[in-house]
């Protein structure tokens, strides 16, 4: 695989002639670059007018590679040829180099099209090296790029040395007067091999070959952050606006940017945006390019570039969406606060629809990028990500409403694909006991790099040393978290049902159909409950449920049995999962209740979960509610079922959904939570220690 490198434009803030004097001080040896063992001038020549000076040197470079590779190669150093063409008239220096020892094994092609800036590019292809080609390519390119960055430091060292010795200015070259006979001789036939063929801009034959050495041009550069020719990036701009990058990372950024300039039709993303995609793919150029191209297509399809100008959230969202921007964190990152526990996600989805919520989340991310740019200018250092503070006080099983969880997973996927590396830190405070269940559902959809930025605190662990004060200035900690700063983020609250979309409006958004596909429907008759069998293979699995009562009042219970129930009588064509047990079962012997009966009224929405203590069979049961004092304490018998099936009495109707989170997944999510921060250990211990008890967290919403 060919290893490629492209440097940014590096600027010397000194005249060209002074830089050339500093460059010559690198030879014949350079103590500042230990791998450079020395050099010897082989040939030297000048043009008749002295404008072009050509020097060819033999140089020795120590091989910094594993001893095994050096032993296989049989050498401890590399000998390479360097040819410098210094043109005083054009004020350019072209350095070409090719390897002499490994000429048949290594090929590097420098590309130096810009003669007015300090810039380097190379490609390295080791064609044959005893099966170690890939390893040696990486070692070689690492060594090459390390010397590239060191090169500028060396030049600046010698510049300072010249100035300290009293040499701060060297006059520009001026042509000497040319006699008439010399002018006539220069106008005669031209030797193809003369020095004139070496002037920049001409191509005297095939491209030179080079290895682990320099292919660069030095010269004048117009003022400004970006080079005027070719719209290149300079090193000072990268350090100031993008942050510290290794030479290889700089090269990836420049190559991807150049590729977009040549191939992308439309607006070229900002450098900060390109860099996020490279970081998301660990600077793997091809993977980053693929991810970025897909995102650019998505942005064009959904007109995301115009979102901040065109999107105005509905008044309902502004009132009930409990999120907003709030100053910045201790590192200067914009701070976004989300009071998720106070937010009625189900009500918001039923009132404005999933698409409106998604668009609002996208606008938050777009605004975040804009604020990062503003903070970069304000604080004078690169800021490319923001911090999110999530308050989970009030989080309960209502937030596990399945359409809401699916919408959340979709939003996570969209943000991960199109806004990578924008989250610098996620602070989660006041995490309740129900949070591990939610985390188990969503954590597989969050990539590992993002999860490593999570800091989770339960109870009051966010207070004091090791808490929020480590990441936020005391002056900006919100008042609702014990700080002194008044926070204007909306408090959220339940969305009134009167503001919900009608069924016709939900049908128009395709939302109702998706919800119906998620849930199953059931009818409950007096004496004929609806039951669902859930087989659990391992203890500490989690059963979650979510159901809506459409008609009548029901009692919901959860039972455990060691044996599989035998189906009771059913009418032909009746739904499986009606009455599944018989009259012979005895409570406390054949089965046991693991959740206290819960009375559910018409119109209510119920969400809950149960961490199982034992493997075996669990029964989710819905039966018609009896008057006070007559709640059934045992399972109905066959005669009750037959009577109910042929009775014209009232029916209860419900929509339900259940899911089992495997024990392995749940334990894994708990481990990942504990690794996020030590502050979560208290919560995880509480959850695991109570797993043997009935500890569901049902919530009723009316």
Image: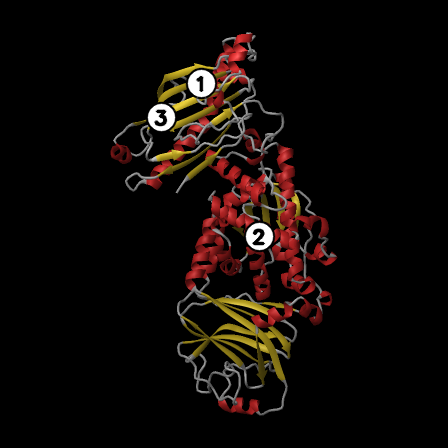
Q: Name the residue nearer the viewer: 13 or 218.
A: 218
Is residue 122 visible in this depiction of the protein?
yes
Q: CA distance from mark 1 to mark 3?
A: 17 Å
Instruction: Give x and y (percent) for residue 64.
Output: 33, 30
Q: Is residue 82 above or below residue 321?
A: above
- Relative to 424, residue 84 above or below: above
Q: Residue at x 61, y 31 (%)?
A: 380
Give the residue number, with chain letter if any, for mark 3: 80
Q: Dot 3, how many residues are within 10 Å of its Cα: few (below 14), some (14-19), or many (20+)?
A: many
Instruction: Name the secondary structure under disc 3.
Output: strand
Q: Earlier in the sequence, mark 1 or mark 3?
A: 1
* Mark closer to the chain start, 2 or 3: 3
Tell me if label 1 and label 2 are in contact, CB under 8 Å. Answer: no
Q: Which mark is residue 415?
A: 2
Q: Residue at position x 49%, y 19% from top?
A: 189
Tag of residue 496: none
Closer to the N terminus: mark 1 or mark 2?
Answer: 1
Front: mark 2 or 3: 3
Viewport quadrant of the N terminus = top left
Are there few (<14), some (14-19), or many (20+) residues within 10 Å of tag 2?
some
Question: What percent of the width, then of the height, locates residue 309?
Answer: 72, 48
Query: How far apart in space, not on screen, are marks 2 and 3 (Cα)?
Result: 50 Å
Around disc 1, counting alpha carbons within 10 Å, would you say few (fewer than 14), some (14 to 19), or many (20 or more)?
some
Give the x, y percent position of residue 288.
50, 46
Front: mark 1 or 3: 1
Asked if residue 547 lies left or right of residue 594, the reply is right
């Amino acid at each position: 695989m060919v290893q490629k490198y492209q440097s940014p434009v590096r600027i010397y803030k000194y005249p060209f002639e002074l830089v050339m004097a500093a460059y010559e001080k690198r030879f014949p040896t350079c103590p500042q670059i230990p791998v450079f063992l020395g050099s010897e001038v082989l040939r030297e020549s000048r043009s008749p007018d002295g404008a072009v000076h050509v020097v060819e040197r033999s140089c020795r470079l120590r091989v910094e590679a594993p001893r095994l590779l050096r032993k296989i190669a049989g050498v401890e150093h590399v000998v390479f040829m360097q040819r410098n063409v210094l043109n005083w008239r054009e004020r350019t220096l072209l350095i070409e180099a090719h390897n002499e020892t490994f000429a048949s094994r290594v090929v590097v092609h420098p590309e130096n099209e810009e003669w007015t800036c300090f810039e380097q590019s190379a490609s390295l292809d080791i064609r044959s090296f005893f099966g170690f080609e890939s390893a040696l390519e990486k070692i070689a390119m690492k060594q090459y790029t390390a010397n590239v960055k060191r090169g500028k430091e060396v030049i600046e060292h010698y510049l300072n040395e010249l100035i300290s010795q009293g040499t701060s200015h060297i006059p520009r070259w001026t042509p000497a007067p040319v006699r008439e006979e010399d002018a006539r001789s220069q106008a005669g036939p031209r030797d193809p091999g003369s020095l004139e063929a070496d002037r920049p801009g001409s191509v005297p034959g095939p491209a030179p070959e080079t290895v682990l050495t320099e292919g660069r041009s030095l010269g004048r550069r117009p003022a400004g952050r970006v080079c005027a020719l070719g719209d290149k990036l300079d090193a000072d701009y990268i350090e100031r606006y993008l942050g510290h990058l290794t030479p290889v990372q700089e090269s990836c950024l420049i190559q991807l940017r150049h590729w977009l300039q040549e191939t992308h039709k439309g607006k070229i993303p900002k450098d900060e945006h390109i860099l996020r995609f490279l970081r998301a793919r660990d600077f793997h150029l091809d993977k980053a390019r693929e991810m970025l191209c897909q995102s650019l297509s998505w942005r064009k399809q959904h007109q995301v570039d115009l979102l901040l100008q065109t999107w105005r959230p509905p008044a309902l969202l502004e009132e009930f969406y409990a999120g907003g921007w709030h100053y910045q964190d201790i590192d200067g990152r914009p701070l976004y606060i989300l009071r998720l526990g106070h937010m009625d996600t189900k009500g918001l989805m039923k009132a404005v629809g999933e698409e409106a919520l998604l668009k609002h989340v996208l606008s938050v991310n777009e605004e975040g990028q804009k604020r990062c740019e503003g903070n970069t200018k304000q604080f004078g250092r690169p800021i490319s990500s923001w911090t999110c503070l999530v308050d989970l006080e009030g989080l309960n099983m209502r937030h596990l409403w399945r359409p809401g969880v699916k919408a959340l997973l979709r939003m996570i996927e969209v943000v991960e694909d199109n806004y990578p590396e924008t989250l610098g830190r996620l602070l989660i405070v006041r995490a309740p006991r129900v949070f591990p269940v939610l985390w188990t559902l969503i954590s597989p959809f969050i990539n590992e790099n993002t999860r490593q930025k999570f800091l989770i605190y339960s109870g009051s662990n966010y207070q004091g040393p090791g808490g929020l004060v480590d990441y936020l200035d005391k002056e900006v900690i919100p008042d609702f978290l014990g700080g002194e700063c008044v926070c204007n983020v909306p408090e959220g609250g339940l969305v009134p049902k009167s503001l919900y979309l009608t069924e016709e409006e939900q049908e128009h958004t395709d939302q109702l159909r998706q919800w119906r596909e998620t849930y199953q429907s059931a009818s409950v008759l007096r004496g004929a409950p609806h039951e669902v069998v859930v087989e659990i293979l391992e203890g500490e699995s989690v059963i979650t449920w979510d159901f809506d009562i459409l008609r009548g009042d029901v009692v919901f219970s959860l039972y455990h049995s060691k044996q599989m129930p035998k189906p009771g009588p059913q009418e032909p064509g009746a739904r499986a999962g009606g009455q599944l047990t018989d009259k012979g079962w005895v409570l406390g012997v054949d089965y046991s209740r693991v959740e206290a009966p819960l009375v559910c009224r018409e119109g209510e929405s119920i969400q809950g979960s149960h961490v199982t203590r034992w493997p075996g069979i669990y029964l989710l049961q819905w039966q018609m509610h009896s008057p006070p004092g007559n709640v059934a304490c045992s399972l109905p018998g066959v005669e009750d079922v037959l009577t109910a099936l042929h009775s014209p009495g009232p029916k209860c109707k419900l929509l339900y959904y259940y899911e089992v989170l495997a024990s392995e997944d749940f334990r894994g999510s708990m481990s990942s939570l504990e690794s996020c921060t030590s502050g979560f250990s208290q919560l995880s211990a509480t959850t695991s220690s109570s797993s043997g008890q009935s500890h569901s967290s049902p919530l009723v919403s009316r």
